[in-house]
Image (spheres, rainbow, N blue to C red):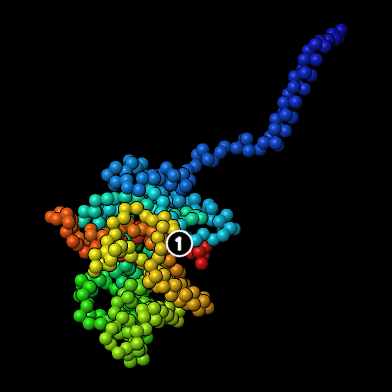
Amino acid sequence: MVKEMRVDSNVLKHKHLVVKLAVSFLLVGFAFRLLYPDSFRFSTDLVETSSTDLEETTTNTDPSLPLASSPTQTLLPFDFFEDQAQLSHNETEDSESKTEKCEIFRGYWMADTSGPRYTNESCQVIESHQNCMKNGRPDSGYLYWRWHPKDCEIPRLSPQRFLNLMRNKSWAFIGDSISRNHVQSLLCILSQVEKPVEVYHDEEYRSKRWRFPSHNFTVSVIWTPFLIKADIFEDMNGISSKEIQLTLDKLDKVWTDQYESLDYVVIGGGKWFLKTAIYHENNTISGCHYCPGKNLTDLGFEYAYRKALREVLSFITSSKHKPVVFLRTTTPDHFENGEWFSGGYCNRTVPFKEGEVDMKDVDAVMRSIELEEFDKASETGSKNETVLKLLDTTSLSLLRPDGHPGPYRQFHPFDEDKNAKVQTDCLHWCLPGPIDSWNDLVMELLVNGDKYQ
């Protein structure tokens, strides 16, 4: 006998209700997912720290913040901030390239409590005249600023990355004492990874060469203040016994003889052309600059500087050797109420903002000549694989009247007499100081230079 199984209708109704509710829930969830897809993603903003975030957390609006009272820094590897900034930079590179190219030489100085990358104790190559901390400069606010282009960010130079890129390479900074100032800044930054070893100097210690042994990397400064052939009758204190004799159509062999051994070159000058000089061309005297009492045509420094720069760039573009060459524009001074020889001084302690200072006529003229001759040489060089890059530091340097040694080019100048009259330096830069940002720009032009041409 087969028994019949009877199903309770109440149970069936209950099951149908459960199924309907489940299907309804799934349909509602699916619809919600379509309407709000981002609700199911984890926000990367909660777990990533961009270079902008790091900048904001280390920015202080007090420009006079003393070194001793700077906030305690998180102990991180030296390159952390550089690597983070580079990462952020690379991530935004594609989007930036679709818009206007960033003008890295136009911007402002941003307060930055991260402070200097080295000190006079951690770097041993600082020249005494630029060693402002050791010489007793009482304020330290000038150390807490960082160059910030208007439309983009550039990372600080990573010394480890730079040295890795420059393995088996050679650099030379060619020009006057500003070039020496510049090379010392670079050496100080790199010395935080490896100490440079001095392997050469000339009799006056103006031209020098250093080597980073573990990277087989050499850095030189070649002192040639005119870049062209010059007979100079001046002692180490700048006192002249005779007019400078300038040969405008011959380059100084002190640098041209070394040119083919160089992989990277930074050339700059200009200020020495303001000195009294007799000009020679085609083996004869052609004129002068500021030579009262002489029966010569005063051609002006502009004439000589353009001729010299044209000769330099012609040599570079016509050479079979093709290093990467940077032309650095002229450096403005900040003497007020006089010059270095007539009581001028520079006692400002914060940067200028854009529009607060005008460029001196002489600097504007020099920079104009540099830009014009650079453009002409770039056009010529583009036809034969010459690599020319413009390092236009004039305007950003103009905004830093606070970055010079002033009277602290000497060791504790006011210890014995608070009213002592001492020579001031409002042209060169304290180390560490604003000139360190020049090397950030050099690195950026090397890595991402095509964006700025």
Counting every numbered tag in the picture gives: 1
Q: Depth check: 211 or 382 in front?
A: 382
Which quarter of the image is occupied by the N terminus?
top right
Query: Where does residue 15 sit, x and y in percent of width and height?
Result: 77, 17
Q: Residue furthest left?
A: 416
Q: Is residue 72 above or below residue 291?
A: above
**Residue at 23% over, 59% down:** 407
Q: Depth check: 161 or 101 in front?
A: 101
Disc 1 marks which amino acid? Answer: Phe
Q: Is residue 337 above or below residue 114?
A: below
Which quadrant would residue 267 be assigned to in this image? bottom left
**Residue at 27% over, 64% down:** 344
Q: Is residue 139 left or right of residue 170?
A: left
Q: Is residue 308 left or right of residue 137?
A: right
Q: Depth check: 213 or 186 in front?
A: 186
Query: Where does residue 107 sit, x and y in percent of width and height?
Result: 46, 57
Element type at mark 1: loop
**Residue at 31% over, 55% down:** 348
Query: Where does residue 415 sit, x and y in percent of width and height?
Result: 15, 54
For the question of whether residue 261 can be seen, the reply is yes
For the question of whether residue 258 can be seen, the reply is no
Q: Is residue 426 above or below residue 241?
A: above
Which quadrant would residue 395 be assigned to in this image? bottom left
Which residue is denoted by mark 1 in the rendering? Answer: 105
Q: Is residue 202 above or below residue 291?
A: above
Q: Depth check: 335 or 319 in front?
A: 335
Q: For mark 1, does the 10 Å Cα neighbourhood hold few (<14), some (14 to 19), or many (20 or more) residues?
A: many
Query: Where does residue 428 sit, x and y in percent of width and height?
Result: 30, 64
**Residue at 31% over, 81% down:** 290
Q: Residue furthest right?
A: 1
